Every structure is written in structure tokens, then in C-alpha cells.
Image (cartoon, rainbow, N blue to C red):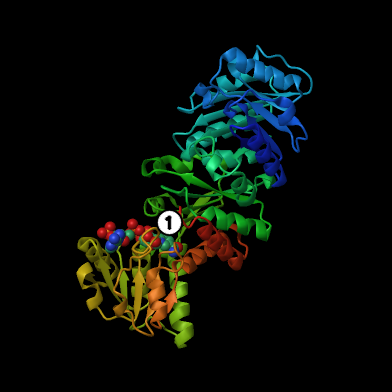
Amino acid sequence: MICVSIARTRHKMMIAEYKEAAKQGADLVELRLDYLRRPPDFRRLLAERPVPVVITCRRGSEGGRFAGKEDQRQLILRTAIAEGVDYVDLEADIADEIPRYGKTKRIISYHNFETTPENLDIIHRHLQSLDPDIIKIVTLAEHPRDNVRVLELIRKSSVPTIAFCMGDFGIPSRILCGIFGAPFTYAAFNPQRRLAPGQLTFREMKDVYHFNRLNQDTRIYAVIGDPVGHSLSPHVHNAAFREVGVNAVYVPFRVTRQQFQTFLDDVEPLRIQGFSVTIPHKESAVARVQYADGAVKMVRALNTLVRRDGAWEGHNTDYRAAMMLLEAKLGAELGEAKPFSGRRVLVLGAGGVARAVVFGLVRRGAFVTVCGRTLERAEALAREAGARHVSWQQRTAVPCDVLINCTPIGMFPNVDEIPVSPGFLEEGMVVFDTVYHPENTLLIKEARARGCRVITGLEMFIKQAVLQFQLFTQEEAPEELMLEVARKELSLSAFTRSES
Ligand code: NAP
């Protein structure tokens, strides 16, 4: 079940919002009475309630807004129970003072906005001694392993327990608590009404993570990176799981460079079946695999980890996607068996994506020139891969048949930037922009206008995700749907999303 937290200052708005949440499919609503400007009118709030209600009235020390005296607050909670609300949230220190009455279920809660303390078991045992129907433990995650620690509490508990972490590092636990047996999770009414750091919205919980479909057999997949909050991958992979009928969920794990050293061991109790790996872990992840495919060995970077027979396999679907798209564009349209042979390719940028593209194209017989803002980096890549290099200033002095942008130039919000002057683009040239937000970058628009054949970054993003999905599930990926979902998400968040 998903419980939508409603926090409004006026009764009228609180009622309107919880009715709307129920209409949209919320199973339960939490009315945050500490947000109300006037004392709560229970008759009004609870009349014709469309779904069960949790009553919460939080003090400032636990992230709430209640400004009155403590005895007033406790009176509100007692009145809620007398009025027969479905659930009441009682903090541990007051639980003994407010007796059980009628059918109202007691949620005995503990909140920690500073850390996930070491003594979680002791806290859980204490809450269990306070006559709970449900135990709720919410802490701030400072490390990915905090997710595992709170989730294990749920698994071990004999009393129904909701346990999750706040903050960027804690997002997985808000979703995965459904797999571990939490009776429900909490979500915000909409993006403007997030009540705690890292809180997901009802739409995200329901339509992206399909929370109500999670069960103990659900397999877990994840994207790891830093930052990872705006990744499109959870949208695309979860939609694909649902479409193909795979009982799996895909969650975002923020993992810093330092945390990555022990990350796979830290989250081992979750038995995560596969990862998408993004910046800054693509190179360091190579050392963690027991098997690396040919592309990983060549490029020495990976973007996919798959658990197979107790070991980690590393794959590079960025590489395979880029090569497949270029092959299709050069080969199928020109009808040539060796489409890269003798082609002059100019690669802009010398980072991770450039590395995959340069190694792949040199191997296929293309004449590749690397052009990087930092000359030494471009030079090093060119030397390693057997390509040439030029300085950034000379980029348009190099004639080419294929131009590939592997820099973030043109990426949202800098959508009016272009890495070469439009006059450099000639009819018949293949222009591949790896930037996918926006889908139609200025480079892509100018290239189309001049009769170039184009490959967009979104095509590459979807192709690498399709290949990843197949590695994860051994099933055919619903490519059209994945593209549709990615386009929809990009347009929904056109003004907020940075690429990751
Ligand atoms: P990266 O490792 O950080 O490399 C970025 C490269 O771009 C570096 O060589 C950097 O130069 C250069 N650069 C950055 N800003 C520049 C500027 N203003 N002018 C000139 N050069 C600049 O990143 P990456 O992983 O290779 O990703 C590169 C781009 O590929 C991303 O921005 C993203 O748009 C795209 N991408 C697409 C997909 C997809 O599936 N479509 C997947 C991953 C990435 P220095 O060497 O001087 O730092």
C-alpha cells in the first residue's frame, strides 16, 4: 500500500488534496495535522473519507511544524483516537501516555534526521515494547549501506514494521521496503509537497516503481552513480519490466567514488541481480568483475554489471549501442559490408563515451581523429587507441565523413550551444550527438537542415538500455515503449532535469 502524506495549512485544501489522492488510487492518506493553521476539526476532516487515514501531528524536533504546547498536541492525538481514525502515529516517548482505544491502530514511530544510528535493533525492541500495531523507523542515510540496515529490521521483525531512510542515499529503501514486508510506504502528494528529503511522489511510487506489485519474489536491479537522482534509467527499465511481465524493480543508488570501494559487499544482503553503472564508476567497476566481455577489456570501462552464477559479469552496452547505430547508419544506408573502412571520423571529447567510440571505430578500420579541450587527454586516448589527435581550436580544420560529439556541449540547459559552427556540416555527413537532453540538440537540428544523416543521443541511450535489459532478463526488450517513456520523461522534466 502507498500512504500519501497530505500537509496543508487549511482544512479545505487538506480535504481536497486527500480526496484527489484517493481518486488517483492512494490506498491510505496521512493527514499531517501539524501543518494546519487552526485546531483540527475532526468531524470535517473525517466526514466521507474515501480511504483510511493516518493521523500525525509532528513536533519540530521530528521534522514537524506543530507550534503549540505538548499537552495540546497530545490532546489532538487522543481526540483523533476517540473519533475512530484508522491509524494514529505516536512517537516513542508519548506512546505509553496515550492508551489504545477502539479500532484505531497504533503506529509507534522513531525519527532521526541526523543519522542512521548504530543501535537500530535496540530502538526497534523498545518500540516493540510500546504496544504497536505497526513500528515505524525513519532515519537519515549517510551511506548506501544504511538502506540495507533498515530493510533488515523489517525482515527480522515479528511486528509489522515500516523502516526506510531519508536523503539521497536512502531513496532505495523507500521503495524496497515493499519487498521486505513493510505494510506500506509513504509518498508525497506531488513534487511541490515533498515533506522529507528524498521523499518520492505518489506518481513515482505507483507508476514508476509499481510499489503495489512488489513482493518477496521481486528481483532487484539498480543504477549506481553520483549524481543519480535525475537518471532516466529507472523510468525506462521499470516500464520495460512491467510490459514484459518480469517481477523486478529497478532503483537508483547514489554511491560516491569512495563508497564504491565496498559497495557491492555492503548491499550483498539485497541480492541485487544487476546494475547500470554510470559516472564516476565506469572505470573502477572493471576491477570488481569476474568476467569482462570483449568491449570492457578493450575500452577498460563498463556500464553494466550482471550477477551470473554467484559472480559479477561486466559489459559495455554504451560501446555496443554506439557501434550498432553507426553500423546501421553507414552500412545499411550505403549498402556496404565494411562501412567503417577508410571513413574519416572526428570525435569531439576524450572522456568515457569518446573512449568507447574511438576504440570501436579504430578497430573497425576507420581513420579516427580525437579532438579534446584538454590536449593531453585527447593525445593520450589517441595514442592508446591508435588514432590521431588535434587541438580543440583545430577541430574544424579536419575533413570528416562522420562527426561524433562526445562532450556535453548543447546539453540542457545550454541548449543554444553547438560544438562546431554549422558551416562545417555538409550534406551526406553522418552526425552523431551523444547528448540526449534535449533529444534534438542544436547540432542535430543544424545537421538535419544541411542534409546530414543523424544519430541522436536518445537513440544511443535507448539502445544501450535495450541491450542492458536483455542482459538482465534474457528477454526481448520493448524498445518502442522504452523510447516513448524516455521521451515523455524528458518532456515532463524539460525544465529541471540534468543528464545522468
Ligand atoms: P566525461 O568522461 O566527463 O567526458 C566529457 C568530455 O567532454 C571530456 O573530454 C571533456 O573535456 C569534454 N568537455 C566537457 N565540457 C566541454 C566543453 N565545454 N568544451 C569542450 N569539451 C568539453 O563524460 P562522458 O561520460 O564521456 O559523457 C560525455 C557526454 O556523452 C555526456 O555529456 C552525455 O551528454 C553523453 N552521454 C550519452 C549517453 C547516451 O546513452 N546517449 C551515455 C553517456 C553519456 P576535458 O577532457 O577537458 O574535461
At 39% from the left edge and 77% from the top edge, which residue is drawn?
Answer: 447
Residue 399: give x, y in percent of width and height: 27, 81
Left of 414 or right of it: where is 175? right
Q: Quadrant of the C terminus?
A: bottom left
Examine the rendering and report whether any part of residue 315 can be seen. yes
**Residue at image point 48% right, 24% down:** 118
Q: Quadrant of residue 173?
A: top right
Residue 296 at least partly seen: no
| Label 1 C-beta lies within 8 Å of the nearest ligand 1 atom | yes
Name above or below for residue 334 compared with residue 369. Answer: below
User: Which residue lies at the image location 71% right of the left edge and 27% below the top edge?
Assistant: 87
Residue 156 place in picture, x, y as percent = 63, 29
Q: Secondary structure at mark 1?
A: loop
Type of the residue with mark 1: Glu
The one nearer the camera, 445 or 288, is 445
**Quarter of the rendered structure image containing ligand 1:** bottom left
Give the x, y percent position of residue 470. Answer: 57, 62
In this figure, what is the number of numbered marks?
1
Residue 473: image location, x then y, percent: 60, 58
Kindly identify which residue carries mark 1: 499
110 w.r.t. 25: above or below: above
| Crowding at mark 1 (Cα within 10 Å: few <14, some 14-19, many 20+) | some
Residue 436 quadrant: bottom left
Between 289 and 235, the one lying in front of the other is 235
Decide which of 267, 144 is in the foreground and name it: 144
- Apparent side of residue 220 relative to residue 407 in the rendered image (left or right): right
